[in-house]
């Protein structure tokens, strides 16, 4: 395939992924209208397992299951306790407490959380640029915490904000745990989700009980399982493998939160506060600064 065609295809996959990511905050809130966070996670996890298994079959990678060593299997099962079990359980609880326009941008601070945790866990050092990115991003957290009240920082729902920020810690730990994971990414994700299913089922039975079959939130939960936890991951991998510039494809990520706010406003009916735009701008600026490499000299 010619380079130009590969790049166009990479952009198509990347934009499709961004479009999916832009809809999931709305899907979370719709599902949470009638489902408890743990029930949403149970349905989404079960659907994602079927989706990922199907994707492995379509790509001819099911044979890789037989090549998993005991060590690889154990590592991916342990990582499954972080994602999807703990990560999405905490994230969905945050969404149940916060407006989508606040929870969604807060989730983008995971990149700076990863930078911070890489210091003690990976032995990395923070540069001045890293520190600037962290400070700017957390100014965005302060603005989002106001939830529309410029003089009322963190008064909207402190627990929801703490949970949203806590989810970024779990997500960062998951990716740090994957730094030495040699398992095929889709296969690893399938093992993560299968390993988490008994934990999620136990938590559901102990707390909320199984959702009714006629629960109106099931369709939105299934959407989350298919697209947020399955298809988007595969599309993004394809985009990154086809492109001749991962930076250009990576920059498409910055479209997602703004598209997401549009869906949140149009579908959920939330009035987007000026503090949301301010907070999001700070968080994305921090992410962008953190991505740029320091120029020598």
Image (cartoon, rainbow, N blue to C red):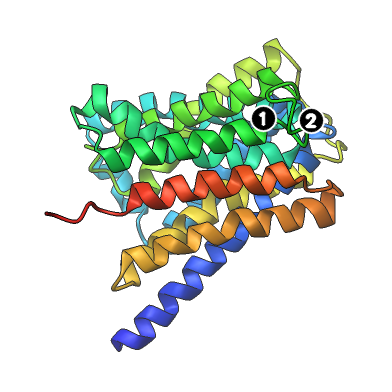
Instruction: Provide residue 2's location: percent of width, then percent of height.
Output: 30, 89
User: Disc 2 marks which residue?
Assistant: 35
Query: Which residue lies at the image location 59% right of the left edge and 21% below the top edge?
Result: 162
Looking at this rendering, what residue extends furthest in the top direction?
A: 206
> Whole-Å distance between the Cαs marked 1 and 2?
25 Å
Mark 2 Cα within 10 Å, few/some/many (few <14, many 20+)? Answer: many
Residue drawn at 61 percent across, 16 percent down: 202
Residue 210 is at least partly visible in this image: yes
Report helix, strand or loop for mark 2: loop
Q: Quadrant of the C terminus?
A: bottom left
Please give left or right for residue 30 compared with residue 38 in the image. Answer: right
Give the x, y percent position of residue 102.
Answer: 68, 38
Identify the mark at residue 145; answer none if there is no mark: 1
Quadrant of the frame with the N terminus: bottom left
Q: In the rendered view, tell whether residue 220 sits above or below residue 175.
A: below
- Answer with left or right where residue 128 lies relative to residue 57: left
Q: Residue at x 53, y 45 (%)?
A: 282
């Amino acid at each position: 395939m010619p380079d130009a065609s590969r790049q166009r295809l990479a952009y198509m996959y990347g934009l499709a992924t961004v479009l999916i990511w832009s809809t999931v905050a709305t899907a979370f809130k719709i599902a949470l209208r009638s489902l408890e966070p743990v029930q949403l996670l149970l349905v989404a996890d079960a659907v994602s397992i079927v989706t990922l298994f199907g994707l492995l079959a379509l790509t001819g990678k099911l044979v890789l299951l037989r090549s998993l060593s005991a060590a690889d299997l154990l590592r991916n099962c342990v990582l499954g306790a972080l994602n999807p079990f703990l990560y999405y359980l905490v994230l969905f609880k945050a969404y149940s407490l916060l407006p989508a326009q606040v929870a969604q941008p807060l989730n983008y601070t995971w990149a700076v959380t990863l930078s911070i945790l890489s210091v003690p866990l990976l032995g990395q050092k923070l540069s001045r640029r890293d520190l600037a990115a962290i400070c700017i991003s957390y100014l965005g957290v302060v603005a989002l915490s106001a939830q529309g009240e410029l003089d009322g920082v963190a008064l909207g729902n402190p627990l929801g904000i703490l949970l949203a920020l806590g989810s970024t810690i779990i997500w960062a730990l998951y990716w740090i745990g994957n730094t030495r994971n040699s398992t095929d990414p889709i296969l690893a994700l399938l093992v993560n989700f299968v390993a988490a299913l008994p934990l999620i089922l136990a938590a559901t039975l102990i707390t909320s009980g199984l959702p009714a079959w006629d629960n109106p939130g099931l369709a939105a939960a299934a959407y989350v399982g298919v697209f947020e936890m399955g298809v988007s991951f595969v599309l993004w991998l394809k985009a990154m493998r086809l492109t001749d510039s991962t930076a250009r494809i990576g920059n498409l990520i910055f479209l997602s939160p703004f598209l997401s706010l549009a869906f949140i406003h149009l579908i959920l009916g939330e009035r987007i506060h000026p503090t949301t735009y301010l907070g999001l701008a700070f968080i994305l600026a921090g992410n962008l600064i953190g991505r740029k490499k320091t120029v020598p000299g």
